[in-house]
Amino acid sequence: MSLGAAARADAPAPATSPSNSSSTENVVVLRIDGEIEPILAEYLLNGIDEAAREHASLILITMNTPGGLDTSMRSIIQAILTSPVPVVIYVSPTGVRAASAGFFILLSADIAAMSPGTNTGAASPVFEAFGQTVQIDETMRKKVLNDASAFLRSYTSKRGRNVDLAVTAVTDAKAFTDKEALDGKLIDLVVSSQDELFARLDGRTITRFDGSTTRLALSHPILNERSMTTREKFLSHIVEPNVAFILLIVGVLGLYVEFTHPGMFAPGVIGGIAILLALFAMHMLPVNLAGIVLLVLSLALFVLEAKFPTHGVLGVGGVVAMILGAVMLIESPITGMGVRLSTALAVAIPFAVIVVILMRAVLRSRAWTQSSGKEELVKEEGEVIEPVGAAPGTGMVRVHGELWRAAAPAGETIPKGAWVRVRKVDGLTLEVEPAKRPQSAS
C-alpha cells in the first residue's frame, strides 16, 4: 500500500492541454462489483496508479456493492482523494446499490453519479450478533459513531456536498434513492448511461480535493477498461470473511484427521493447503484475537467431549464457542462486515460431530488388543504345566492349546495346575500372573 501511495504522490499531474486530445481523453475504467475487501482495494489502487502513469484525463469507477470492510474502504478513499487524475464514481446499472462502505466511497469522488433506480446510504455502524441488535457500552457506541461521522465529514465538506444529510446515513442509517441523493446535494449527476455521463462532463470544470481546478475534455473518450487479473479474482474470493473461516475450519479438520489416522495423506494435504490459504486471508483481514481464542477453545472442548462422558455438555459448549469465535473473527466496527451467522452454524455443528466421532474411534482403538500374531495372547488365560518361577523360561504353561515357556512376577512361584493370565509376550516367553480358575476349567 505504501508503495502505491508513493507512486501516486510522485506521478505527474494529468495533462490538460487541448492540443493533446489523445492523452487527455483517455479514461481508465475500474469496477466495484461485490463486497469491499483487501484484494478489491489492491485492484483499485493499482488501477489509479496506472491511470496516473498513463496521464489519463479521468478514472471512471462503476459501483455495485452492499458494503464491506472499513479498512479496505479507507484505503480506497485515501487513494481517490490523493489521485492526480480526477475520479468519477458511477452507481450503475439500474437496480444496484452503493450501501454502507459504498456510500463512503461514493461521496469521496470528484464527481458522484448514479443511474436511475439505484440507491445509496445505510452506512450506520453495525452492532449485531445472531441476527439481533446487541446492547453495547454507550461510550463505545458513541466512539464508533463519532469516528465514522468525523471521517465522512472530513472529505464531504471539501467536495462541496451536504455534510449534515450525509452524516444521517451514519447516525440514523438513512438510505437515499438517486433522486433524493441528487436533490439533497449528495451526488452531482443522475444519468442513464456512460455516454450520457461523458456528454454531461465534457467541458466541465471541477474542483479537486486539494483546491485546484481541472477542465474535463471528453468529447471523444477512449475507454481503457482494466479488469481484475485471474490472480486477483481468485484471491478476492479467498479473503471474503465467510470463505476464510471455512478454509480455516477445513484446514484444521484435515490436519486433525491426518494426525488421528496417519497414512491417509489426502486429508493432510488438503488441510495443509486450506490452512495456508486461510492464513493468507487472515493476514489481509482485520482479525480479532478473541475470535481465534474461541475457535481454539471450541476444538479443545470437542476433544474433551469425546474423551469424557459429559452427556454433550462440552460438545454444546464447543459449538457455542465456535459460533461466537466465527462471528467475532473479523473485526470491522464501522461496516459490520464479518462471518455470517448462517455460515458459522453450517460449519460448527458438522465439525463438532465429525471431531467427536473421530476422537471416540481413536480412543476405542487404543483399548483393543492385538488380533493377530503373538500379541493376541495378552490377557489370555491358561494352565501351568511346570511350576513357574521369576527366572525367564523356568516353567511351562498351556495357552490356546500351545505350550509356552513362562516367567512369574518377581518373588513369586506359581505351582503346577494353577491358572494364570498372560501379561506380556517377550520373544518366546510369556510373562504371567496368577488368575482365578474359571468354573468350566475346574
Image (cartoon, helix red, strand yellow):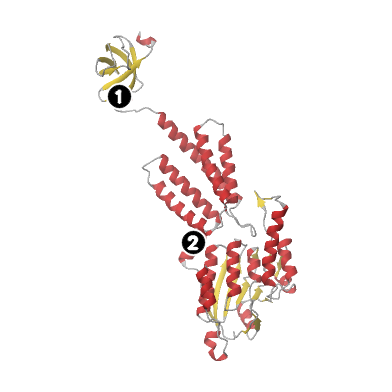
In what element is the residue under mark 1? strand
Which mark is on residue 235? 2
Residue pointed to by mark 1: 425
Q: Nearer the viewer, residue 223 or 169?
A: 169
Q: Position of residue 238 (x, y in %)?
A: 50, 58
Q: CA distance from mark 2 to mark 1?
A: 57 Å
- Amino acid under label 1? Val
Q: Residue furthest front?
A: 411
| Residue 21 relative to residue 377: left or right | right
Q: Is residue 253 left or right of residue 378?
A: right
Q: Residue at x 46, y 38 (%)?
A: 358
> Counting residues from the N terminus, which is met first, the one under dot 2 or under dot 1?
2
Residue at far top of view: 442
Between residue 387 and residue 123, name the one nearer to us. 387
Question: What is the x, y in percent for residue 352?
Answer: 53, 41
Q: Position of residue 63 (x, y in %)?
A: 60, 69
Q: Residues within 10 Å of mark 1 (few under 14, many from 20)?
A: some
Judging depth in this view, the residue of 151 and 222 nearest the camera is: 151
Q: Is 268 left, or right, of 220 in this rendering?
A: left
Specify the quadrant of the image occupied by residue 371: top left
